[in-house]
Amino acid sequence: MKTEVKICGLKTAEAIDRAIELGASHTGFIFFEKSPRNIEPDDAGVLADRIRGKAKIVAVTVDADNDFLDEIISALSPDILQLHGSESPERVLNVKAVYGLPVIKAFSVRDADDLKKIEPYIGIADRFLFDAKAPKGSELPGGNGVSFDWRLLDALDGSVDYMLSGGLNAENVGEALALTGAKAVDTSSGVERAPGVKDLKRMQEFFEAVARGPSTTPGSKT
């Protein structure tokens, strides 16, 4: 089965068009003011017309209230909501009930105990996203360009549907796939030349690395 690829933090038509050309299954727009990848809902709505029907459109929020979600959904009409904050299981249920959209619930991982936090969300969230915990001093819940110990995912029940994130790039995604068997990967900073600025060459290299599949040697071309 082909590995799904989500390119997150998109802000320009050029990057979006390339992501679609390369075969992205998901495209993410980030609505979080502190992020260098933040985009206004109306701007995202215009860009989304280049994606619709070709890849899933994901709206990424951090502890957003319903007023902000109303604004985002009205402008963007996303396929999926990604909740990347401290949203409770009850909040996830509420969001699904109000908006009728599938939800990806993101979790920051550093150790085995962090993975146990998904248990109350199983059967509620439609999918999980595992990101690395932010380094000290960062105000961003994701997009920090750091990874976690992928071997921790060995403890997961095989029925848990998740997307792997956190510092993935062309050099390490093969190793990540080998260690986890992830069916979907997410990258943002790993395909940028500067925070919030996508690099088309790095995007291509990332897709090529994913297509090569699992590799036990970081950066391997085999």
Image (tube, helix red, strand yellow):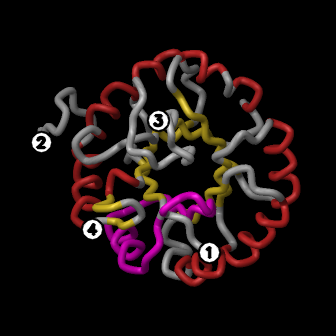
**Amino acid marked by disc 1:** Glu
Q: Which mark is residue 197?
A: none
In this image, 145 relative to 92: left or right? left
Q: Is the C-beta separation of discs 2 and 1 under 8 Å?
A: no
Which one is in front in this view, the residue at disc 3 or the one at disc 1? 3
Q: Residue at x 53, y 36 (%)?
A: 130
Image vertical order of residue 74 relative to residue 148, above or below: below
- First in sequence, mark 2 or 3: give its number: 3
Which one is in front in this view, the residue at disc 2 or the one at disc 3? 3
Cα–Cα span, label 2 and label 1: 39 Å
Which one is in front in this view, the residue at disc 4 or the one at disc 1? 1
Cα–Cα span, label 3 and label 4: 27 Å
From the image, which quarter does the N terminus lie in? top left
Q: Which residue is labeled 1 in the image?
A: 40
Q: Secondary structure at mark 1?
A: loop
Which one is in front in this view, the residue at disc 2 or the one at disc 1? 1
**Amino acid marked by disc 4:** Leu
Q: Which mark is residue 200?
A: 4
Cα–Cα span, label 3 and label 1: 26 Å
Residue 77 at x, y percent in the picture: 69, 72
Which one is in front in this view, the residue at disc 3 or the one at disc 4? 3
- Highlighted magenta segment, given as a residue range: 10-36
- First in sequence, mark 2 or 1: give its number: 1
Cα–Cα span, label 2 and label 4: 20 Å
Mark 1 neighbour class, 10 Å CA radius: few under 14, some 14 to 19, many 20 or more: some
Cα–Cα span, label 4 and label 1: 22 Å
- First in sequence, mark 3 or 1: give its number: 1
Q: Which residue is labeled 3 in the image?
A: 135
In this image, 156 relative to 183: left or right? right
Residue 194 at x, y percent in the picture: 32, 61
Q: Is the C-beta separation of discs 2 and 4 under 8 Å?
A: no
